[in-house]
Image (spheres, coloured by chain):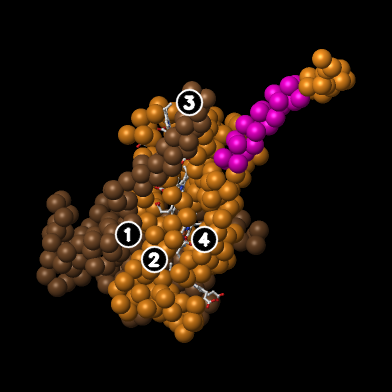
Chain colours: A brown, B orange
Amino acid sequence: MNRLVPYIVVVLLVAVSACRQDMHDQDKYEALEKNEFFDDQRASRPRLPGTVARGHLQADDALYRGEVDGALVAQVPLAIDRALLARGRERFDIYCSPCHDRVGTGNGMIVQRGYKQPASLHDPRLRALPDGYFFQAITNGFGVMPSYAGQVPARDRWAIVAYIRALQLSQSAALAELDAADVDRLQRAGETQ
Amino acid sequence: MAQIFHPSTNTFSKVSIFGAVFLVGGLLWGLAVVNRSGYATQAGVAREQPVPFSHRHHSGELGLDCRYCHTSVEDSSSANIPPTQTCINCHAQIWADSPTLEPVRASYRSGESIQWVKVHDLPDFVYFDHSIHINKGIGCASCHGRVDEMNLVRQVSTLQMEWCVDCHRNPAAHVRPKEEVFNMSWFTQDQEALGARLVDEYHIESRDDCSVCHR
């Protein structure tokens, strides 16, 4: 009998080692996991229409809708500083440049592959429109361009708008408005090309 | 009584006792290798997906930033798999009749999720958070490899505890400038000097307490 003990221990150890999956796949749900309980099988629940999560009330019309009493907001309702522009540039390059390209002329990679070409953001018509117009184009979509509200939160949308303004300025600034150092840089860049 | 074994077999038995040490050692070594291999960790195995979505195509060739789709990777524990709407952003017009994309259009019409097969899956008793890694300058490629060159995503790391802890004990060997986190092809000749500087600059601590990952 005693000689059997080691074998029994080994068999038990093997059996125990098979139990580890219980702790690997626990009865909790991770993000985007499947949950059979709901009809749509999503463990991450979509927000119910007509409800607001605590602390997420979007009461500020200017900030979240880009218009106040039906009039488009004229200027970005955030403090415009270097950090905001840098953020705007980064977000523009991620979410907009695939179609509008990095300077906003509308020749992005996806357009080259056959997507409808958007108007250049440097078009005089667009330059004359208020900031709220651009915000709403991102928020609600424009023509065939879908809404980017799901991918870009409101503050980032305003950062993008601020950056679009900077882009517009960059493409049509008069030489006389630049200081000497910038003119110098511009000339050197022209020579190396 | 006559001896059963001839004295010359002594050598044989000595050699086999000596060899047994190597045999056991070899077996243990073999186990360790198998345990870290793709067979046990599923590393290197590409999964069939409901739609043959190619990162090489979308990220490598079209140049889409990871964050265009994995929107929450910078500020949440989960990176997020994009909803069907994100695909439709472009595929409402591009390859709009392609049969390969039929499951995407079907999902858009019906509102049912596309059921992607999970590639990287840590056990549920491990806590992992993307945001801290991204914000402390660990690039996607350090953990996921050159995703922009993969047609179907496969795991390149073992995802074993040893792998996590190796980096946590010596983050300087992997950290990169924050601007380069999403750059798949970033490389430096002088990781040692750069790593030491960035660990200081980003206040990176070497964290290998059990409670960091098991909480």
Judging from the image, mark 2 belongs to the subunit labelled B
Residue count near mark 2 (Cα–Cα under 10 Å), binned few <14, some 14–19, many ≥20: some
Q: Earlier in the sequence, mark 4 or mark 2?
A: 4
Q: Position of residue A69 (x, y in %)?
A: 11, 70
Q: Residue furthest bottom?
A: B97
For the point 64% across and 36% down, the residue is: B30
Q: Amino acid at mark 2?
A: Gln
Q: Position of residue B14 (x, y in %)?
A: 78, 19
Distance between the alpha carbons at the discs numbered 3 and 1: 49 Å
- Where disc 2 sits, the SS reads loop
- Residue B115: mark in rendering: 2
> Measured along the vertical axis of the image, is residue A71 above or below residue B175?
below
Residue count near mark 3 (Cα–Cα under 10 Å), binned few <14, some 14–19, many ≥20: few
The residue singled out by tag 4 in the image is B47
Residue count near mark 1 (Cα–Cα under 10 Å), binned few <14, some 14–19, many ≥20: some
